[in-house]
Amino acid sequence: QVQLVESGGGLVQPGGSLRLSCAASGSIFSIYRMDWYRQAPGKQRELVATITSDGSTNYADSVKGRFTISRDNAKNTVYLQMNSLKPEDTAVYYCKVLAGTPEVAYNYWGQGTQVTVSS
């Protein structure tokens, strides 16, 4: 089993910045892919950013140039640096980790952290 603990959410004014963290612990053999998702009220959960084991990244068009995903493999932690925040970035942010062995891997979800962008 893998446990994920997220932190870093909060209330920020438009144009401000936040840094989210998601630390994985437990029976970890390898972590392959790490993602950040978000879900705004009344909307479906959407993929925001992805980072693979070799460091390749991908972003939703809505956050390109403003958000940066990174990972610290030694700490089994993924980060999401969010700059130039907009009210439409308000959502609960979730991390998801694909972890396991080369034979079998599972997706694990964090509990979510609230990000509110408002003046």
Image: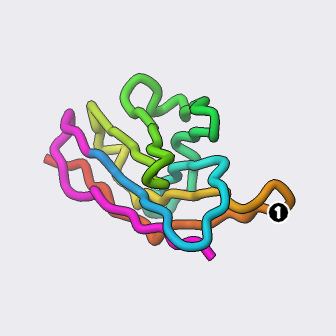
Q: Where does residue 75 sit, x and y in percent of width and height?
A: 43, 53
In terms of depth relative to the viewer, which is nearer, 22 or 12? 22
Depicted 74 relative to depicted 95: above or below:
above
Color style of the picture: rainbow
33 w.r.t. 26: above or below:
above
Residue type of the residue flagged with mark 1? Val
Looking at the image, the residue that sits furthest to the right is: 103
What x and y, as percent, mark residue 54? 63, 33
Camera-side residue: 49 or 23? Answer: 23
Give x and y (percent) for residue 106. 73, 65
User: Does the rendering let one see residue 19?
Assistant: yes
Residue 96, image quadrant: bottom right
Q: Which residue is found at the position 66% from the left and 48% from the top?
A: 32
Label 1 sits on residue: 104
Q: Nearer the viewer, residue 114 or 81?
A: 81
Q: Nearer the viewer, residue 37 or 101?
A: 101
* Mark 1, secondary structure of its residue: loop
For the point 81% across and 54% down, which residue is it? 102
User: Where are the magenta residues, as a range?
Assistant: 1-18
Q: Is residue 19 left or right of residue 93?
A: left
- Please state the horizontal and vertical placement of residue 83, each as a whole percent of the image: 28, 33
Determine if residue 44 is in view: no
Q: Is residue 40 above or below residue 86?
A: below
Image quadrant for the N terminus? bottom right
Query: Is residue 11 one of those drawn in magenta?
Result: yes
Residue in the image at 50% along x and 68% along y: 25
**What's the residue at 48%, 32% (across, down)?**
62
